[in-house]
Image: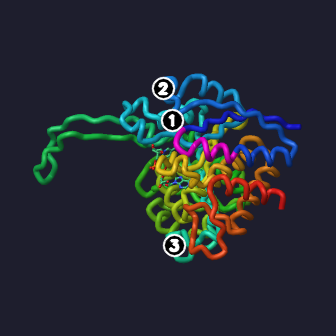
Amino acid sequence: MSSYKIAVIRGDGIGPEIVGAAIEVLNKAASMCGISLEYREYLAGGCAIDSCGIPLPIETLEGCKASDAVLLGAVGGPKWDNVEPSRRPERALLGLRSGLGLFSNLRPAIMFRELSSASPLKDPGDVDILIVRELTGGMYFGENGSYESSDILSDGTVKGEVAFDTESYSEGEIRRIVKQAFELAMGRNKKLTLVDKANVLRTSRLWRSVANEIRRDYPEVSLDFLYVDNCTMQLISRPSSFDVIVTSNMFGDIISDEAGEITGSIGMLPSASLGAPGTPGLFEPIHGSAPDIAGTGKANPLATILSAAMMLRWSLGERAAADLIESAVRKAISAGYRTPDIMGNGSGEIHVDTRAMTDAVILMMNK
Ligand code: NAD
């Protein structure tokens, strides 16, 4: 029997509720697929500040490094809003990403047909996009600063304070993520779109030349290029025509939110952050800690349950167990189960809380 060590970070707000739900579903999948999962709980975020004074205790990072994968709920909340910036709960996420060397962020945007009325689009079609965002380079990590300048602009205005952020990418950083995107495209519809701004940015042109080099190793994958401004429009006008999108840190940050919004509910969207093969990945819903509904039973656990499925697939290589969970979520949605965030007009719907949605998914695993 394959056995895996999972580091569990429940975090703040609805984190403990949704992670608890995901663990119940994982346990069911594990027992059905002959896998053994051993969980170790760690603190991060606001609860870690309360308990140890810092958002990411060293034992949390060390525990995560020593595990096969990390399952995280969400961190943060109003209680810690006035904490000094370097100690805010969200710093734990940055510390985990850099400490675990997580360079790629996988954000699937999947439209469940039954939930299409929640989409802001009239007729989104069958949306199933996987966005692969570079996570540790680009402008968010480049050189930045500010200085005073007495230079005069053409209309006579004094420049005053000047601030700058630098977009910079190395060939190696681009190669590892583009290669991963090709691999992911091979496992799907063999269609990859590189989103960039190559008409303006040198870094984008480097992304294109590296991608053109790597495509030779993947002759079955069709690769196309799209400027990011055009991509934001195409995502609205023809979302179902995309398969895998690979892009830089900042562009990925923006278009993954846009693609997620098309699918209708933040409570349905999972994510994975991966590093080098063989190192633990981090799996978490894309939403935050939703302090407004914490403890009310209104939290939709499906984004976290689907994140757990991604963990089985991408970090543990347990495809059958991942398929089992994803299919059970589809069946629960088809059967009409709805938490408040995904309720529609009511006809044929079974309105449930976090507990009952978790039970519904577990029930569907037997069907
Ligand atoms: P949020 O994602 O927590 O909530 C936005 C809205 O979506 C709220 O109305 C919330 O009730 C709803 N929502 C979110 N998840 C839901 C779910 N599973 N089911 C049903 N409804 C859900 O964003 P926010 O309110 O801007 O942030 C709250 C806190 O979370 C802040 O402290 C923020 O910094 C933190 N945050 C953490 C993460 C993370 O841990 N990865 C990500 C984003 C925000």
Using the image, tell me which numbered label, if any, was put on residue 316: none
Q: Mark 3 is on which residue type? A: Leu
Secondary structure under badge 1? Answer: helix
16 shown above or below 53: below
Q: CA distance from mark 3 to mark 2?
A: 42 Å
Which residue lies at the image location 40% right of the left edge and 55% below the top edge? Answer: 200
Q: Which residue is pictured at 55% across the width and 25% down the height?
A: 57
Instruction: Look at label 1 and name its amino acid.
Output: Leu
- Disc 2 target residue: 54
Query: Does label 2 point to a residue whose CB lies under 8 Å from ligand 1?
Result: no
Residue position marked by numbered label 3 in the rendering = 121
Q: Nearer the viewer, residue 348 or 131?
A: 348
Q: Which corner quadrant holds the N terminus?
A: top right
- Alpha-carbon neighbours of circle 2 within 10 Å: few (<14), some, or many (≥20)? many
Some atom of ligand 1 lies within 8 Å of the CB belonging to the residue at label 1:
no
Dominant SS type (magenta): helix
Q: Is residue 321 visible?
A: yes
Is residue 11 covered in magenta?
A: no
Q: Nearer the viewer, residue 115 or 128?
A: 115
Q: Which of 36 and 260 lies nearest the eye of the viewer? A: 36
Judged from the image, the secondary structure of the residue bearing numbered disc 3 is: loop
Looking at the picture, how far across and down is residue 88, in whole percent? 43, 33
| Left or right relative to 128: residue 287 | left
Identified at 78% across, 57% down, the residue is 363
Residue 214 in sight here: no
Which residue was labeled with disc 1? Answer: 94
3 or 1: tag closer to the N-terminus: 1
Tell me where the magenta segment starts and ends, as one range: 12-22
Where residue 166 sits: x, y (%)? 39, 40
- Tell me where residue 247 appears, x and y as whole percent: 54, 52
How many numbered marks does the figure carry?
Answer: 3
Q: Nearer the viewer, mark 2 or mark 1?
A: 2
